[in-house]
Image (cartoon, helix red, strand yellow):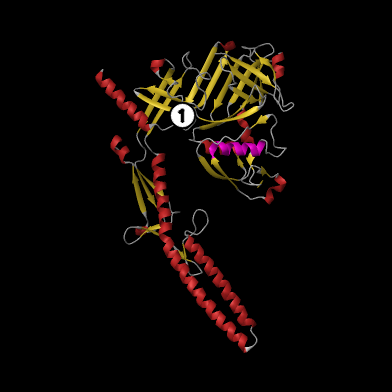
Amino acid sequence: MGYRIFVRGNVYEDERRLLGEIDTWIKLDFTVRFNAVGTWQLLVKTGTYQEGLLTQGRGIVIYQDGVPDPVFSGQIDAFERYWTVEQHTAAGSVFVGGKCDNQFPYGFLAFPGVSSPGTDKMAVLPIEKQYTGKDTRPAAGPVGQAVWVEADLAFGSRAISGRRIGALNVGANVPVGTSVSDSLRFDNLGEKFEGWLKDKKVGYRFLWDHTTKKIELKLAACRDRSKEVRFSPDLGNLKQYTWQLKAPDVTRAIVACQGEGAERYLWQKIDSEGERQWGVKREVFVDRRDIPLKTDKDGKPALVTKTGSDGFEEIGQNPDGKEWTADLTARRAALEAADKAVAAAEKAVADAKTDAEKKAAAESLAAATAAQKKAQSDVKAAIAAAKPTVVEHYVRAVEEAAAAALKEGEKTGHFQIYPIDTEQVKYGRDYTVGDIVTVAVDGEEYSDIVKEVNISVEDGGQTQSVTPKIGEQGTGDPLNLYKTVWEMKAKLRKLESRM
């Protein structure tokens, strides 16, 4: 399949019209990424009319033969002059490049201050009015809707006029995907979208549309093409694959908390399966003195506390900065009220003039003092009652610390594939980024989302390279497919034993 490259103009009458085609380019490289920013680079000869079309503020639109809609669109961000004695020795050539239109969310922040919050009329307040709003703003709902709302508020129809992007349409609400719940405070929208969409099987893309002449936001659930789009050596569309199994670096995580000496609380988590499979035992010590637990006389976890200047045990606050239980919150509020009543009664005693006033003030002070002592006793009881809740919270923190240590040193199974385009299965025509496809090797099948596709075309389209990346491979955080690869190994050994 060939590719055609068009130059789109700046915003004019709320459109981005095509100005002409670049058909004498030397080399084209572009990368499409799922829910992230792709890149492109085009090598053209210097001094040609077509080079003159590629100026700041404009962009490109790439069509693939046999595919009706563009497969890529993006702005021009960079120029690089290129000359060698071996190639283009006359006028030379120039690299023109940039990012795809998914770059737009990465250039905007989620302003927390809004008017008419939670309604269809909600709009972001300008910078000079942000002080009148709240310092954080909730974001919730189906993930597609959450992305649409924030794009619309930042640079769409509900944006402040100075922030609105011309000839860009975010469309209507698309409430697809599972729900997200978050808070916003000047967060980068692109990075926030990545977090919201991770593992959600919902994708967004900003792409130029030939009908509206605008950049359109497209939101949709991932298409399951796992039965139709398959890669395997038998089908001839895999040029290479590798898999690797590695024993765990850690099989036993020992977490040590705040207590001292014999009272220091220790907890161990063991990867029994890893020890059984690989025949190793490998321990790691996790020092977590920030967790206020100690060992009591029965060997159970207990809270480490100290008595404050007010005579109460200090048990801290929960992760939200509040009291650990509703009862403790109510008891502290009652004590605060009792303290104020005592202070008021003491002032009344000091201000009393007549014997009758002094007697009444003294009686009021006695009653207030008795109520204060009762409130103090209630607070102490509520603190004691809250301790199991606090201990439970910190025990979970210990377990999470152990699990994190085992995760960091866990057994791994990495699986890397290198598909190629064939007449039966082609990128753009049969699948695209965000689609779920299948890889079948060594008797095992693995289905995941196409996260990225790298395309390189040169020699007038005669030489092409189309390389999809499936799952997390190639992203710097390769997917740990230990179970899948272990089963591959087992099936391969059975196959070899029969040969």
Secondary structure, magenta segment, majority class: helix
Report which quarter residue 380 is drawn in: bottom left
Q: Quadrant of the C terminus?
A: top left
Residue 400 on the magenta span: no
Residue 263 seen in render: yes
Question: Relative to the observer, which residue lies in front, 326 or 45?
Answer: 326
The picture places residue 226, in percent across and down from the top left corner, at 43, 24
Q: Residue at x 47, y 33 (%)?
A: 477
Q: Residue at x 48, y 16 (%)?
A: 421
Start and end of the magenta stretch?
142-155
Dot 1 amino acid type: Gly
Q: Residue at x 42, y 27 (%)?
A: 447
Residue labelled with disc 1: 471
Question: Relative to the observer, which residue lies in front, 274 or 67?
Answer: 67
Q: In what element is the residue under mark 1?
A: loop
Residue 149 on the magenta span: yes
Report which quarter residue 441 is drawn in: top left
Q: Is residue 351 left or right of residue 368?
A: right
Q: Is residue 68 above or below residue 253?
A: above
Which residue is situated farthest in the right direction here?
Answer: 13
Q: Residue at x 42, y 15 (%)?
A: 236
Residue 47 seen in render: no
Q: Is residue 457 left or right of residue 54?
A: left
Q: Is residue 268 above or below residue 353?
A: above
Which residue is situated farthest in the bottom direction here?
Answer: 355
The picture places residue 470, in percent across and down from the top left corner, at 46, 26
Q: Is residue 13 above or below residue 177?
A: above
Q: Quadrant of the N terminus?
A: top right
The picture places residue 471, in percent across and down from the top left corner, at 46, 29
